């Protein structure tokens, strides 16, 4: 078990980008330090706060730099580990029980 478990984002940033939509953190000192560093990293670069970049970009840069030994502390799962691929009813497999409603048409979301 790792301190951070997150699915790989399809292709929004960096050579590897972890999705921040759903991720798991263990209650450890490393996780506390990691969250503080993630926040500080964003504050050091206003483009992350006010520009086109976002928290996933910050996390990708931290992963690339291996901040706080992030690579050894993170379990990177496939993109569909915590999300589905739209349209869910056509693309999901029995091993994918999670449905990401935001990607689905309004008519689907209204009936769930």
Image (cartoon, grey):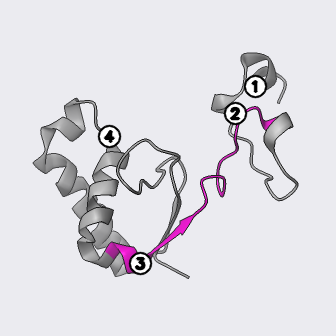
The residue mark sitting in front, 3 or 1, is: 3
Residue 88 image offset from top left, x and y in percent: 78, 37
Please identify the residue farthest to the right as the structure is shown. 94
The residues bearing labels 4 and 2 have C-alpha atoms spaced at a distance of: 21 Å
Magenta stretch?
70-88
Which quarter of the rendering shows the N terminus?
Answer: bottom right
Q: Which residue is mark 2?
A: 101
Q: Which residue is mark 1?
A: 109
Q: Which residue is mark 3?
A: 73
Residue 10 image offset from top left, x and y in percent: 53, 46
Residue 75 image offset from top left, x and y in percent: 51, 72
Q: Which of 42/17 is in front?
A: 17
- Compared with residue 79, is residue 84 higher up or lower down, i.e. above or below? above
Total count of labels? 4
Say which mark, if any, is on residue 54. Answer: 4
- Compared with residue 55, is residue 86 higher up or lower down, i.e. above or below? above
Please identify the residue farthest to the top as the structure is shown. 107
Of callouts 3 and 4, the N-terminal one: 4
Tag 2–tag 1 contact (CB < 8 Å): yes
């Amino acid at each position: 078990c790792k301190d951070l478990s997150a699915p790989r984002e399809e292709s929004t940033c960096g050579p590897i980008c972890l999705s921040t939509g759903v991720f798991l953190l263990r209650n450890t000192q490393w996780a506390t330090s990691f969250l503080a560093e993630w926040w500080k990293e964003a504050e050091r670069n206003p483009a992350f706060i006010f520009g086109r970049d976002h928290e996933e970009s910050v996390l990708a840069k931290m992963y690339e730099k291996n901040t706080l030994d992030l690579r050894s502390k993170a379990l990177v799962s496939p993109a569909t580990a915590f999300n589905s691929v739209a349209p869910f009813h056509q693309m999901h497999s029995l091993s994918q029980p999670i449905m990401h409603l935001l990607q689905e048409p309004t008519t689907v979301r209204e009936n769930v």
